[in-house]
Amino acid sequence: MNDKEKDIIERDDERLKILVNDLFDKLKESLLTACTKQIEILEARLFEKEIENDTLKKDIKNLKSQVNLQSEENAKLKTQLANQEKKEKIRK
């Protein structure tokens, strides 16, 4: 192989290396962009779920409070009913 052929092969080899490096850089950038976008989407979904969970926790707390109030009311009514039944028995 003469010097001229060697020089051409070396230049082509260098161009090929640059081309491959550019290609890999573009692929890495594309993959990073896609991953970043997917992470942002997942973070947004997670945030929405956290808000939904907070809302549901508040709803549960309110419902428990209502159940407790209803239980207290039921207990009062049972006591009143028992007292009325006692009074009716005494009257008879």
Image: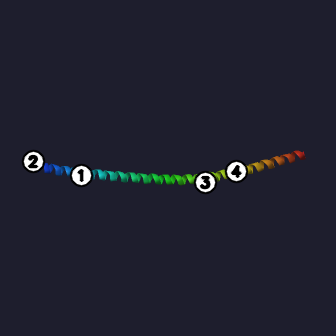
Mark linked to residue 58: 3
42 and 92: which one is in front? 42
Count neighbours of disc 1 (C-alpha within 10 A) and say few if under 14, some if 14 to 19, many if 20 or more.
few
Residue at image mark 1:
19
Q: Which is more N-terminal, label 3 or label 2?
A: 2
Q: Label 4 is placed on what type of residue? A: Asn
Q: Where is residue 37 in the image (x, y as percent from the top left)?
A: 40, 54
What's the CA distance linking mark 3 and mark 4? 15 Å
- For the point 71% across and 52% down, the residue is 69
In front of the other: label 2 or label 3? Answer: 2
Q: Label 2 is placed on what type of residue? A: Asn
In front of the other: label 2 or label 1? Answer: 2
Q: Position of residue 48 (x, y in %)?
A: 50, 54
What's the CA distance linking mark 2 and mark 3? 83 Å
Q: Which is more N-terminal, label 4 or label 3?
A: 3
In front of the other: label 1 or label 3? Answer: 1
